[in-house]
Image (cartoon, grey):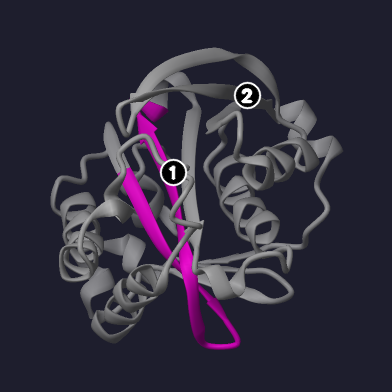
Amino acid sequence: MLDAHFPVFGLRLRTPRLELRLPGGEELAALADLAVDGVHPPEVMPFLHPWTDRPPLERARGVAQNHWRALGTWEPADWRLPLVVLDDGLVVGLQELTGRDFAVTRVVGSGSWLGRRHQRRGLGTEMRAAVLHLAFAGLGAEEAVTGAFADNAASLAVSHKLGYRPDGIARYAVRGAPAVEQRLRLSRADWRRHRAVDVEIAGLGEACRAQFGVGS
């Protein structure tokens, strides 16, 4: 089994509606198809790197390449965990958790997207809650950080619901225009106060924890 050599392949996160795990080949293809179908209205750009502006074939290929790149460059001191999100077995989006020097900093980051037809159902909150539970309850994180552009009301609403607090702003050029990102930070204490989703973790054994750079 592959998880004997790359233990995070055995990791599973389950919420009342969702399962999150590393995708197999068919699930990765479904994720790429979902990206081609659309992630956001064309007149807005919620991503710092506008990968969804690429032609459909390149967009789909980019989803697969991003996934393989995350796993191919994985190190305990610098990792990205790109989890496919499944609703009753149907691929609905991607939820990523990241850590750099996590064993020292105990800080994680996150990013995500949902196919347009799966939005406005509360899935964004549930899938972020799943990886936050992995980070805080499973891996011993002390803080989680994220960010969203000021016009991304849906992402900001998810963060506020889960207890994040404002943590400054950053300014970027996106599509040749200025874009202001609201940075947000979640402490362990605030995570505990705002836990609203039941999450089950499976497959987080000693070998898996070591892959994230933390001991048992």
Q: Residue at x 52, y 42 (%)?
A: 139
> Of helix, strand and loop, which one carries label 2?
strand
- Which is more N-terminal, label 1 or label 2? 1
Residue 89: x and y, percent? Answer: 52, 88
Q: CA distance from mark 2 to mark 1?
A: 22 Å
Which amino acid type corresponds to the residue marked 2 in the rendered image?
Arg
Q: Looking at the image, is 23 positioned above or below residue 94?
A: below
Residue 96 falls inside the magenta stretch: yes
Q: Magenta segment, which residues?
A: 80-102
> Of helix, strand and loop, which one carries label 1?
loop
User: Which callout, 2 or 1, points to the residue nearer the camera?
Assistant: 1
Relative side of 215 to 167, left or right = left
Q: Residue at x 59, y 26 (%)?
A: 143
The quarter of the displayed image where residue 104 is located: top left
91 vs 39, nearest the viewer: 39
Residue 88 falls inside the magenta stretch: yes
Residue marked by disc 2: 185
38 vs 60, nearest the viewer: 38
| Magenta stretch: dominant secondary structure | strand
Relative side of 126 to 1, left or right = right
77 vs 172, nearest the viewer: 172
The quarter of the displayed image where residue 83 is located: bottom left
**Would residue 203 be seen by someone viewing this image from the given angle?**
no
Labelled disc at residue 45: 1
Q: Residue at x 56, y 33 (%)?
A: 141
